[in-house]
Amino acid sequence: MTVKIVTDSTSDITASLAHELGITVVPLVVLFGHESFLDRVDITTDEFYRRLTQENIYPTTTQPAPGAFADVYQKLLKDNDEILAIVLSSKLSGTYRSAVNAVSMVEGKGRIEVIDSLLTAMSLGLIVISAAKLASQKGITLKELSEAIKMELPRTNTIMAFDTLKFLAKGGRIGKAQGLLGSLLAVKPVLTLKDGEVAPLTRFRSMGAAADYLYNHIACMSHVEALAVEYATTPHEADVLVARLGAIYPQENIYRSVVSPVLGTYTGPNVLAISFIEGK
Amino acid sequence: MKQSNMINGPEFRDMFAAATNWLEKSASDIDALNVFPVPDGDTGTNMLLTMRSTVEEAYKVNGQSVSAVVQAMANGALMGARGNSGVILSQIWSGMAQGLSDKETFNGKDLAQALTQASETAYKGLSNPVEGTILTVMKDASKASQKQAAKNSGNVVAVLEAAVNAASESVANTPTLLPVLKEAGVVDAGGQGLFTLLDGALRYLRGEAELMRFRKPQLVASKIPMTPITVIAPEKVGADEIPFGYCTEFLLKGKDFELEKLKRKLVRRGQSLIVVGDDTTVRVHIHTIDPGSIIHFATTLGTVHSVSIRNMDEQHQDFLEMQKSRAPVADIEILAVAAGDGLSDVFTSLGVASVIPGGQTMNPSTKDILQAVNNLRSEKVIILPNNKNIIMTAEKVQVLTEKHIHVVPSRTIPQGIAALLAFDYEADFDTNTHIMTKALASIKTVEITRAVRATQFSGFSIKKKQAIGLLDGTIVAVADEPVDVLRSTLAKAGLKKAEVVTLYYGQDTEESEAQQAKEEIASKYPNLQVEVVKGGQPHYNFIGSVE
């Protein structure tokens, strides 16, 4: 019995980590006008954020076509028994629908399960990593694996400190954080995911204070199972946060990643995020 | 009223109606007895407005019973309480009502007991009663009245006389008890107000009503020698603080109109008031935030024609509408008190459900805050008073509403904003109150204003109209120009460790001045994020936060 793990590019899993853990990443698509790029494949994060901040055009995004998932399923099913696809929140993207529709295209019913994580960014990434590690255990079935992962989902989340909500509002994904728009003071909103949608947590006047909040959120947990820090354009701030978190969680085990272009379309530059699986 | 041994309800009401008129004559003198020479919560005005609401309620009572009248007065005081002195005064009235409950009439002994009850209730209402204030004056007056009543229980005038004399002594003694008064060279304003009220009631009782019309109450002089103070009438600010509104015009037809009387009735309801015409036709022009109430009032006087209500700032309204359409907070709503269109917009943009106009020199009453609370959809309301003189008024609202009220005791605008930002959307009512209260300490407040009188304070020799800088409520700098004071005040606020400085410039301050100050700070502290925001607040050239 082998189960393979599939996810989408908003999980922010780096190519080398995906390779190492045998995870297949299906990219979403980011578009600058009529130019289209496969997320993290055709465009690097550096190039994306350069264009985002320097060009006068807001990018847009689209979900992968069902065919993209179907291709992946087909290839994987040749050499493996089952597939668990874990994708970003169905409330933020149609990716889940594509992943589900693709199942019937490859006659994979019963051999493929698709989970709507209600998450994105590295909280999705951490779940996917956890699934890949479990899948490598001998003899685990798709059913067992899917049940184990569903138990972890409620303890998993991402908290993001935004420099601006401009991009989130433009992209129509602002959700319950709507009320945080239009502030006459420069504030750094801190948002999270709630029931698969963007929801507000609180606000700060400086990124430094917001980073303190991210740190404190983790420091208040009695037990942390997995931890990740992400940034868009400010690696130094991410490094500082990782070093601080090192005092409460083994620093070498903290995943460090860059927010993917598709997510960056909504977060904008300067965003700083932590993702975690809280211990039981 | 001549010397009488038994006083009934209407007589009691008339005593304090006269006392309120007596207080009105020296309200602005009492306002000037500020400890700090800053435009501050005006004690005299606040006590006067509280008393007006107190007496108004008394007139709604039919019958002769004193207990019904004083109960109505206690309710009126509670609803009309403005500022800390107003809240304490309302507690005094609540005690009086308890002391005179079940009494159809009262004599001197009853009065002494009611005054004692009033003193006790006033003390009980405060978590941290301070001596040398209105409380001490109330206590001393009630003690003296008890002593007198023991000697000669029946005579109301004798008992009240004893109370008034003791109150005067007590006011003179306040600087001995409270060092800040001594340093500022003033007697306690609230104590002075209470003395004036008791004095007015006594004079009326003695039958001096006619005489009172031509006289004016005297301020009690301090027992200890102090720097002479220059009493100046504070500027009337109410009208200027209406930040936006409707230009309302109409023609009023009827008969026997008295233009002066009409003007007096309308002047408090808005600004730019024009009333012209004759005794049958009057044209009225006024800028107001509530045109409905003006028109309603006008229809009670005659027929209303050619009504024109024009929104003076559509854009501003659109902005507010846009803000209203959001529902940022699920079941908790936040109310803030702020003066100035800019500050009001800042609070609204950060998600408060409603902004009550008010602040320094214009303290909203308990009723104003209660109404704002009742207008909200939510059952759980957090109030940000943003002024030390409004905290107690806000705290009084809880007893008047079924809703759950928490007051986060913000003493300044920047504190209020810091508390508001700290709001946690995932936390419950109690936790949020705790988080927000904790956030008050996270910032420093800088306020730049002009001295309303000359004084010596904290080692500074301050001339009238000089600019003064306060850091968290303490005077730390004095100079002629506000910008210079801003510079030296900020220098004492620990900018090296700060991350963000926000400057809210006032209605009489040019944006360019604020921008210039920003440039200076930014070039000196390159890592500091400096933001300039239009505050539009009266009196204060700059309000700043350092965090």
Image (tube, coloured by chain):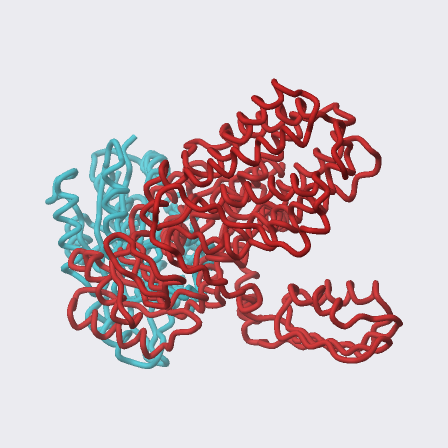
Chain colours: A cyan, B red
Q: Vertically, is B245 above or below B367? A: below
Quarter of the image where one finds residue B92:
top right
Residue B222 image offset from top left, x and y in percent = 41, 44
| Residue nearest the viewer, comparing B322 with A99 | B322
Q: Where, quadrant-wise, is the C terminus of chain B in this rendering?
A: bottom left
Instruction: Answer above or below: position of B252 versus B269.
Output: below
Relative depth, front residue between A51 and B449: B449
Above-or-below relation of B146 to B439: above
Whether residue B70 is visible here, answered yes or no, is: yes
Residue in the foreground of this view, choosing between B232 and A174: B232
Please state the total of marks drawn on the protein image.
0
Q: State the quadrant of the N terminus of chain B.
A: top right
Instruction: Tell whether A111 sits left or right of B89.
Output: left
x%, y% of residue B33?
A: 44, 52
Coordinates of residue A16 in the picture (x, y in percent): 15, 56
Instruction: Give the residue drawn at x 77%, y 34%.
Output: B9
Q: Is residue A202 visible?
A: no
Name the side, left or right, on which B55 lies relative to B280: left
Front residue of this view, candidates B403 and B130: B130
Q: Position of residue A192 (x, y in %)?
A: 37, 50
Outermost residue, top direction?
B150
Tell me: B265 left or right of A38: right
- Left or right relative to B58: residue B388: left
